[in-house]
Amino acid sequence: MTTIAQNIVETLAANGVRRVYGLPGDSLNGFTDALRATPSIEWVHVRHEEAGAFAAAAEAALTGEIAVCAGSAGPGNLHLINGLYDANRSRVPVLAIAAHIPSTEIGSNYFQETHPQEVFRECSVYAEQVTDAAQMPRILEIAMRTAVEKRGVAVVVLSGDVGLTSTNSDRVTVVRRARPRVVPNDAELREAAGILNAAGKVTILAGAGVEGAHDEVVALADALAAPIVHSMRGKEFIEYDNPFDVGMTGLLGFSSGYRAMEDCDALLMLGTDFPYQQFFPSKAKIIQVDLRGEQLGRRVPLDLGLVGDVRDTAAALLPLVPRKKRRTHLESSLKHYAKARSKLDDLATPTKKGQPLHPQFVTRTLDRLAAEDAVFTADVGTPVIWAARYLTMNGRRRLVGSFTHGSMANALPHAMGAQAAFPGRQVVALAGDGGLSMLLGELLTLQQNRLPVKLVVFNNASLNFIELEMKSVGFVNFGTGLDNPNFAAVAEAMGIKGVRVNDSSELEAGLAEALAHDGPALVDVATMREELAMPPTITAQQAGGFTLYALRTVLSGRGDEVLDLAKANWRRVF
């Protein structure tokens, strides 16, 4: 007879799952033993379950298929939570196997006892416990289908002893994602077209929902004479081969994206849940298109909300919007973008000999040297800013990050999942020193699993973005300094190639050496601590905050920090 654990593994194999990320434990023994007997599925041994969940999230994001992670009872599966939050908020299909204490001990405050269904409820689209063999394989099938159709995390909770019981059915089901065509009705499309045709200045805001709709959105922008502003998650899908692109807006963006939205009289939101209300236009009519109706109007009041797939909806709208002859808004926005882009590029310069490097220069050099189909991951914090502004997407490159959940320490484990899923592609992690050190043990995962990930560490000896946030509201930096090791030497001690870069003249050779290495490699780059990442528009409150920060810092006897800040950012002033 087939056990429940064996049936789970057989079903995973039938559905094309090729790896499971996790750590073993006695409550998982039945499951991992079934994996041992299944050559088509690899057990990717991680050093922390959180990293396993992040890795699964990245794999699912890149492949669009269900990815799997597992954790043992109690603390083991609790460690999955942060990575599962990231996966669920990124809307990627992940199945988590959460082992549980012996079924006869549930409710007795037993060793390692938690209540997994309650714990995982908020970070999943489905979380159920198997307590009887008769529930299987139906619960697994429901979990997988829910993860695939709702694009989120499904959790199956399973006591170790229950996993070893025989199933009543050895049925194996292949779950295939439905791909319906979803477009607004004709009346809604005509209403949207009426608003867009009447507007003199239309701007498009494109998010992750434009994936697979590049050509349709660009064609619509041409007809509407609309500049296209993109969110961070939309960057990889719409920025390339796009003559209407004017960059990003939001905290990571720059002035041209902000201006194109603020100056429009009609904003067309396509597949975006952009959360920052202060960056929406104050007077424009707003149309939002999203496949999830519950998201309509969540961030800003709408004049019209449409439920539909972006690709099909854009294609349906196109015949209803004659090509605009007046294109001054588009032309002005493109000119502003060219100036903003030039100013950003001017910041990507080498420093004087012996000085820490400008992170803009590091990222621009990496962008130039990386493969045309590279997969990039970026830590939350300033590495995401530099990735947003200096990595070039081309339709083949990919960019993964914790862009919605906003967790530190994501770059390395995301890169693990990307490399495991695509062993032949170059995978590069832009890691912060704080993020890397938080899950530093995963360097051993790279070495043990022979994952040739390349890490570029922005080593500024600080939690840099947090310092920037403190400065912007007038606080003196506190608790943000990091006493870092030589990360290159740490990598070497773990069996990974390590390269240390202390001078701008060393950067290109150091990056090239690491990228050419046939195994995992880490480049530890000393970068400017006081480099400012300016938002696209500075509020009076932020300007006042910086003034207050400078005064407080000087008065606290740390005036040298203000001088360092001025030295690091003189290029923005002169």
Image: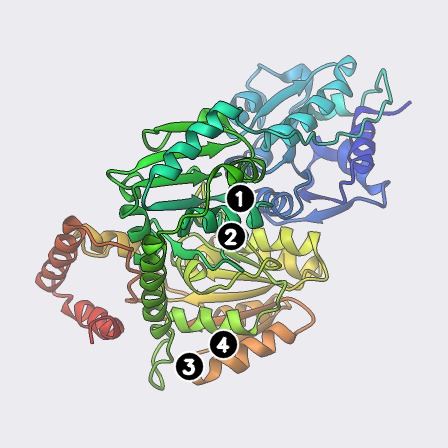
Q: Which residue is mark 3?
A: 504
Q: Is residue 67 above or below residue 432?
A: above
| Residue 27 vertical position relative to residue 367 in the rendered view, above or below | above
Residue 31 in the image: x percent, y percent? 76, 33
Q: Is 504 or 50 nearer to us in this picture?
A: 504
Residue count near mark 1 (Cα–Cα under 10 Å), binned few <14, some 14–19, many ≥20: many
Nearer-N-terminus badge (4/1):
1
Mark 2 or 3, nearer chain start: 2
Badge 4 amino acid:
Arg
> Closer to us: mark 2 or mark 3?
2
Q: Which mark is residue 238?
A: 2
Mark 3 → mark 4, Cα distance in angstroms:
11 Å
Q: Amino acid at mark 3?
A: Ser
Is label 3 in a helix, a strand or a loop? Answer: helix
Q: In this rendering, is residue 174 above or below 412?
A: above
Q: Secondary structure at mark 1?
A: helix
| Residue found 69% across the figure and 71% down from its top | 518
In the image, is 332 to the left or to the right of 310? left
Between residue 275 and residue 532, name the one nearer to us.
Answer: 275
* Residue labelled with disc 4: 500
Pointers 3 and 4 in contact (CB under 8 A)?
Answer: no
Contact between marks 1 and 2 (CB within 8 A): the answer is yes
Give the label, 4 or 1, closer to the camera. Answer: 1
N-terminal label among 1 and 3: 1
Classify residue 570 as left or right of residue 288.
left
Name the residue carrying label 1.
Answer: 210
